[in-house]
Structures are given as C-alpha cells and as structure tokens.
Amino acid sequence: MSEHKKGLPKPEKNLIHYAAFGFGSGLAPKAPGTFGTVAGMAIYWLLLQDLSLTSYIVMLLATTVLGIYLCHKTAADLQVHDHPGIVWDEFVGYWITMLMAPAGMIWLLLGFVYFRIFDILKPWPISWLDKKVGGGFGIMVDDILAGIFALATLQLTAYFLPSLSF
C-alpha cells in the first residue's frame, strides 16, 4: 500500500504538493516516475520547445531552484524522503535532456527513452548522489545528472544520425 493511501495528505489539496506530484501525474499507482516524465514531455511539447536558448536555460535554472523547494517541502510534510509520487524532478530531468534537441517527434521520444534509462539504471555517479545527498536537492540532483547524461546521449545521436525522423 502506498504512503498516499495510508492517510498522508492528498497532494491535490495543497498547491506545493500538487506541483511536486507533477500536477497529479505522480499519483499513478505504478511507474509514477514514468508518468511524471510523460507529463513533463507534454509540457515541453506544448510550452517549451520553441523557447530561445537563453530563455530555455533561464527556465531550467528557475524550475530547478523551484523544484528543490517543492521537493524538500513536500517530502518534509509527508515525512517520506523522495516519495515515489514526487515527480517534479522528472520534469526538470527531461527538460534538461531536451536542451537544444532537434525538432521532431522522434527526438521527443528518444529524449524520453534516454532520460528514463539513466533515471532508472542510475549509473555512477548518479547512484552515489541518489544515496548520499538528502533534502530537496538530493531528490533533484540524481534526475538533473540523469538529464545531463541523456542530453549528451541525445546530442550524440543527433550528431551521428542527423536525418533521423518520423
């Protein structure tokens, strides 16, 4: 039984928790991180993909700082470090992945796959940071680094397979 079902506050009743829970996407009973990434993908597609590079970087910095607060506050209120439903970190990790991504649905999907691979497998140093760093920054940092690894992988794919599309 998830912590949410055991009587912890319902995220939809608190704006900070609701944002940390990915506007409800983190409430998925299975694979909330994947559902959170899908929600982050939708936000990227609808609102972020056409930002200038400078605006995009400012957005990443702002959502990272905001995420540290949202994740810290929600985890503290729920008294559960890195509750599985907290998926704001997946939003930011995916958005980092998509920095300077080529246009096209294939790149959105590849970014999703690459980010999920690094977020789930947590190769070193991601796994080390995930275990050693606490608080809101600890919740965010492993996804930030997974996003950076996925960003590098996506950019290498774009470099070596520039005509990839569908």
Image (cartoon, rainbow, N blue to C red):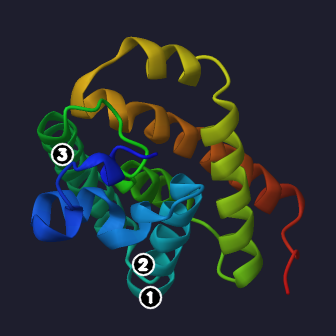
Say what amino acid the circle numbered 3 marks.
Answer: Thr
**Who is closer to the viewer here, 123 or 55?**
123
Residue 129 is situated, as x and y percent measured from the top left of the image, at 46, 18
User: Is 116 displayed left or right of 156 in the figure?
Assistant: left
Residue 141: x and y, percent? 39, 32
Q: CA distance from mark 1 to mark 3?
A: 26 Å
Residue located at (54% from left, 46% from top): 147
For residue 99, say whether it is visible: no
> Height in image: 129 above or below 85?
above
Is 50 on the left or on the right of 101, as rendered?
Answer: left
In this rendering, the count of numbered labels is 3
**Crowding at label 2, few (<14), some or many (≥20) Cα neighbours within 10 Å?**
some
* Quadrant holding the C terminus: bottom right
Residue type, numbered disc 1: Leu
Q: Earlier in the sequence, mark 1 or mark 3?
A: 1
Q: Which mark is residue 74?
A: 3
Q: Is residue 31 visible?
A: yes
Q: Nearer the viewer, mark 3 or mark 2?
A: 3
Q: Nearer the viewer, residue 157 or 4?
A: 4
Please name the residue that numbered disc 1 is placed on. Answer: 46
